[in-house]
Amino acid sequence: MSHSNRHMELHLPPLLNFVGDVNLLAFSPAKQPATQVPSLPSLYIYAPVAELPYLYTVLDKLGFECYFNSENLQTWQGVNLCFFKKQALSPQQLQALQAAEEQGAQVCSLQSFIEQHLQWVEINLLDAEYLLEIEQASDLSKKWPDRFRRLFDLVAASLLLILLLPLFLPVAIAIRLESKGSVFFKQLRTGLYNQEFEIIKFRSMYENAESNGAQWACKNDKRVTRVGQFIRKTRLDELPQLFNVLKGEMSLIGPRPEREVFIKDLERVVPFYRFRHLVKPGITGLAQVMYRYGASAEDARYKHRYDLYYIRHRSWLLDLKILLKTVRVAFTGEGI
């Protein structure tokens, strides 16, 4: 092991402690933190020496077997080699990266490697530069993808309303028979570019459920009616949001819109939380089908990982997978 100021080699023993599902194609939502993790590849990392203690902490929890600033490898053929904070690397480290790539190493940024193997964004390693790369790598700045997405939303939301409209009346009757109050529930949520809009849902709680102030929704919430439990579990309470889609305030797929009062708290503990507002909020999203029903700031941290992954990698294929999984969740109630 080298003890120079510029290069240090560390071998980290893996600690498997992972929440969520690493296989996007399998699409198994994590109701509870996973107890078993697929074998993760070892990787070599070039990073500024000052960042090593922090990287050790983050990557150790993810379960990667890592070697930092290694100079003792005989061959780089086929080796996974990552860099972290490239602008802060020394000239010697940059030369070593180039030489390793010329010898056959698979070189990429640490965040990209994590996304590839865990299929979410590690928010503990985020910085402003990476978020700018997300915007450049995705279709956020392109007009035609947005226009096609808007056209798809209009057609799909219209068809879904026609098909599902017969469900509106029995749901409305059931809500009114159990508890007094309006059938529909309206609430301000924060959407695209931090603009607030009024979301529409079937009412699932008793009237004046938040008379004592805003509270996190949670599993077995006593404020939720029996009918409300059912329509939440089957996602029927979300159906009126199809009107939000038609109005252009929401998309079928995207990060779920949150209330501003909660966002102000979450952005203190979740890095770059408002970055999710670069796309329209959705009726369903990757976080909703890949993670359990969230009721805390810690849950919001994990869901933010999936939201950022979706923003960076959103595509028609990914949207289709999310839609299909949403149908399954609605019929099985996996998300509750």
Image (tube, helix red, strand yellow):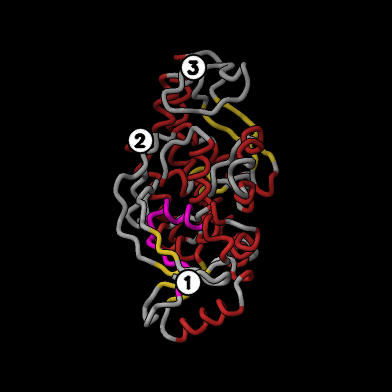
Query: Pointer 3: what residue?
Result: 176
- What span is in magenta? 55-70
- Picture layout, residue 197 above or below residue 307: above
**Pick the front one: 65 or 49:** 49
Secondary structure of the residue carrying tag 3 is: helix
Question: Could you tell me how far apart the alpha carbons at marks 1 and 2 are, in whole angstroms?
Answer: 53 Å
Query: Pointer 1: what residue?
Result: 2
Q: Amino acid at mark 1?
A: Ser
Q: Position of residue 20 (x, y in %)?
A: 39, 47
Question: Could you tell me how far apart the alpha carbons at marks 3 and 2 are, in whole angstroms?
Answer: 23 Å
- Picture layout, residue 75 above or below residue 161: below
Q: Position of residue 57 (x, y in %)?
A: 48, 52
Q: Amino acid at mark 2?
A: Gly
Residue sitting at x 52%, y 56%? 53
- Picture layout, residue 299 above or below residue 225: below
Q: Amino acid at mark 3?
A: Arg
Question: Could you tell me how far apart the alpha carbons at marks 3 and 1 are, in whole angstroms?
Answer: 72 Å
**Which circle, 1 or 2, is nearer the viewer?**
1
From the viewer's perspective, tell me whether residue 330 is left or right of residue 112: left
Quadrant, the C terminus: top left
Q: Position of residue 176 (x, y in %)?
A: 49, 17
Q: Are marks 1 and 2 in contact (CB under 8 Å)?
A: no
Query: Pointer 2: what residue?
Result: 333
Residue sitting at x 33%, y 48%? 28
Which numbered tag is attached to residue 283?
A: none
Is residue 187 visible in the rendered image? The answer is: yes
Upstream in the sequence, badge 3 or badge 1?
A: 1
Secondary structure of the residue carrying tag 2 is: loop
Q: Position of residue 102 (x, y in %)?
A: 46, 86
